Image (spheres, helix red, strand yellow):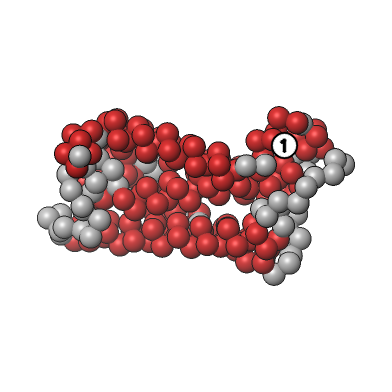
Amino acid sequence: MTDQPRRWFTGHRGLGALLVVTGVIGLLSAFELTLDKFRILEDPDVVLGCDLNPFFSCGSVMTYQESELLGFPNQLLGVFAFMVPIVLGVLLLSRVDVPHWIMNGLAIGLLGGVALVTFLQYTSIFEIGVGCPWCMVVWVVTILQFCVVVASNILRGALGATAQRSTVLRVLASAPVAIAAVWLLVIAATMIVEFWTYFGSLI
């Protein structure tokens, strides 16, 4: 096995703390979206706390069919899905050695989450033309969790010795937060361009 410099996200405490904190943030965001969905079902004319303006409004996005891809509100997926990294984060903080296959399973689950939020980002920005504030919080934590978990799995050898020895993968895995930041900046820049009518009015 190749000796690796210790990173904050390859240890129990660092990775565990990140999973718990981001998991709780994602869970609360998804839970708030769920409550907002119920408020809309009860009163279609209700003005939600996250209805900031015509370009950033949770309520507007929830009226589209893309908000219920599987026949039920997407936010319910988040409520249940974010419990997994929270539980694993607590185990890591408790110094439990979580098996590689479970951490790889988490990475696969987060890959699915990233695929879903990417589809929703495209729909929200290019088709609906409205951004959902609480959804954006979910986007951020999902992308951050995915980048850090995959990087941790690579450096700890959870993805196998070949991946751990790969110079390219080691370099990329050494800066998962930076990769997530660039990823999110691209999304933000895209939103600024597409919603320029709003952002241009602020100048």
Tag count: 1
Residue at the extreme front of the image, as rendered: 203
Residue 197 as seen in the image, left or right of residue 192:
left
- Residue 177 shows up from this direction: yes
Instruction: Identify the image quadrant of residue 99.
Output: bottom right
- Residue 146 shows up from this direction: no
Residue 29 as seen in the image, left or right of residue 173:
left
Q: In the rendered image, which residue does mark 1 sit on?
A: 170
Q: What SS does tag 1 mark?
A: helix
Which quarter of the image is occupied by the C terminus? top left
Residue 17 as seen in the image, left or right of residue 56:
right
Q: Position of residue 132 (x, y in %)?
A: 30, 47
Which residue is at a point 85% across and 40% down the rendered structure image?
A: 2
Which quarter of the image is occupied by the N terminus? top right
Residue 172 as seen in the image, left or right of residue 22:
right
Instruction: Identify the image quadrant of residue 110.
Output: top right
Residue at the extreme bottom of the image, as rendered: 94
Q: Nearer the viewer, residue 65 or 193?
A: 193
Q: Nearer the viewer, residue 166 or 108?
A: 166
Which residue is at a point 78% across and 38% down the rendered structure image?
A: 164
188 over 82 or under it: above or below: above
Q: Position of residue 21 (x, y in %)?
A: 52, 62
Query: For the residue marked with disc 1, what is the amino acid?
Result: Arg
Residue at the extreme right of the image, as rendered: 1
Q: Position of residue 104 (x, y in %)?
A: 68, 45
Q: Residues within 10 Å of mark 1 (few under 14, many from 20)?
A: some
Which residue is at a point 35% across and 32% down the rendered structure image?
A: 190
Q: Position of residue 105 (x, y in %)?
A: 65, 47
Q: Nearer the viewer, residue 37 or 98?
A: 98
Which residue is at a point 70% across and 61% down the rendered structure image?
A: 12
